[in-house]
């Protein structure tokens, strides 16, 4: 049976890093709405692409209809694969939509991994990234991070309750070493 897993946590908590490990060492496909959106905004001639780029640079959420459309096409074509949802869902509407679209293929989410981390650690991480990385994303700055954390608290955290009711939430300490977080995720999903 294929596995469907959501990685849930604030920006900078390490969801992307763990997704990439699960893809390279285990048989998973990563569906990152952030990556899909960045690809969709790379066309400078696309008016909608440039509007979405601006929303992302401000750290706001891209409208649901756009994100849902991107994801639904992928879910349908990948339904027999092990999938990690990275950065989706980000609000309750998206979470309910994901449940429904899996249901239509007789599937359901198996695990939601909640990355627990203190907000101060996220600020330290972004400050280091700005100092050390030569490949900064356009939303890699302290101002946008603060916006993104506020939106995370307001829109994304309420999803936890939705998944708690389904009894599929598992918590990992995202302040631990990358390899320990990875081991803990494996213990949950295997
Ligand atoms: P990420 O790469 O997951 O950190 O996402 C980068 C940005 O893309 C976010 O700050 C949002 O502007 C946008 N984004 C990514 N996923 C979603 C989503 N599920 N819903 C709305 N906006 C999203």
Image (cartoon, rainbow, N blue to C red):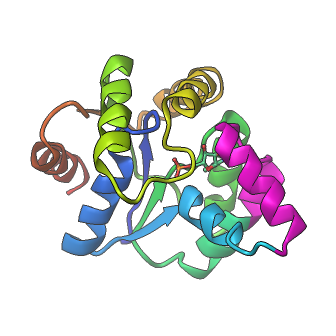
133 vs 179, left or right, is: right
160 vs 76, left or right, is: left
| Residue that appears at 47% across and 28% down | 164
Say above or below: 164 vs 139.
Answer: above
- Residue 150 position within the rendered picture, expressed as x and y whole percent measured from the top left: 59, 21
Say above or below: 178 vs 19.
Answer: above
| Residue that appears at 38% across and 20% down | 119
* Quadrant of the rendering where the C terminus is positioned: bottom left
Magenta residues, dominant SS class:
helix
Residue nearest the viewer, comparing 112 with 148: 148
| Residue that appears at 54% across and 63% down | 35
159 vs 24, left or right, is: right
| Residue that appears at 83% across and 55% down | 51
Counting every numbered tag in the picture gives 0
- Residue 70 position within the rendered picture, expressed as x and y whole percent measured from the top left: 70, 67
- Residue 116 position within the rendered picture, expressed as x and y whole percent measured from the top left: 32, 27
Q: Residue furthest right?
A: 47
- Residue 180 position within the rendered picture, expressed as x and y whole percent measured from the top left: 10, 43
* Quadrant of the rendering where the N terminus is positioned: bottom left
**Quarter occupied by residue 10:** top left
* Residue 50 on the magenta segment: yes
**Quarter occupied by residue 3:** bottom left
Say above or below: 86 vs 13.
Answer: below
Asked if residue 170 can be seen in this view, the reply is no
* Residue 170 on the magenta segment: no
Say above or below: 44 vs 139.
Answer: below
Asked if residue 135 can be seen in this view, the reply is yes
Where does the magenta region start and end? 45-69
């Amino acid at each position: 049976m294929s596995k469907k897993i959501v990685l849930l946590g604030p920006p900078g908590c390490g969801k992307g890093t763990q997704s990439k490990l699960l893809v390279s060492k285990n048989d998973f496909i990563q569906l990152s709405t952030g990556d899909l959106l960045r690809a969709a905004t790379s066309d400078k001639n696309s008016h909608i692409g440039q509007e979405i780029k601006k929303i992302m640079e401000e750290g706001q959420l891209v409208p649901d209809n756009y994100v849902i459309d991107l994801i639904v096409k992928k879910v349908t074509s990948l339904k027999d694969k092990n999938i990690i949802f990275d950065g989706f869902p980000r609000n309750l509407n998206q979470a309910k939509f994901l449940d429904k679209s899996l249901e239509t293929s007789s599937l359901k989410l198996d695990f939601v991994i909640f990355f627990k981390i203190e907000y101060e650690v996220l600020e330290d991480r972004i400050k280091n990234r700005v100092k050390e990385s030569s490949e900064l994303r356009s939303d890699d700055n302290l101002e946008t991070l603060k916006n993104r954390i506020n939106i995370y608290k307001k829109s994304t955290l309420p999803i936890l309750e939705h998944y708690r009711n389904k009894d599929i939430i598992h918590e990992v300490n995202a302040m631990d070493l990358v390899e320990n977080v990875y081991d803990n995720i494996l213990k949950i999903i295997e």
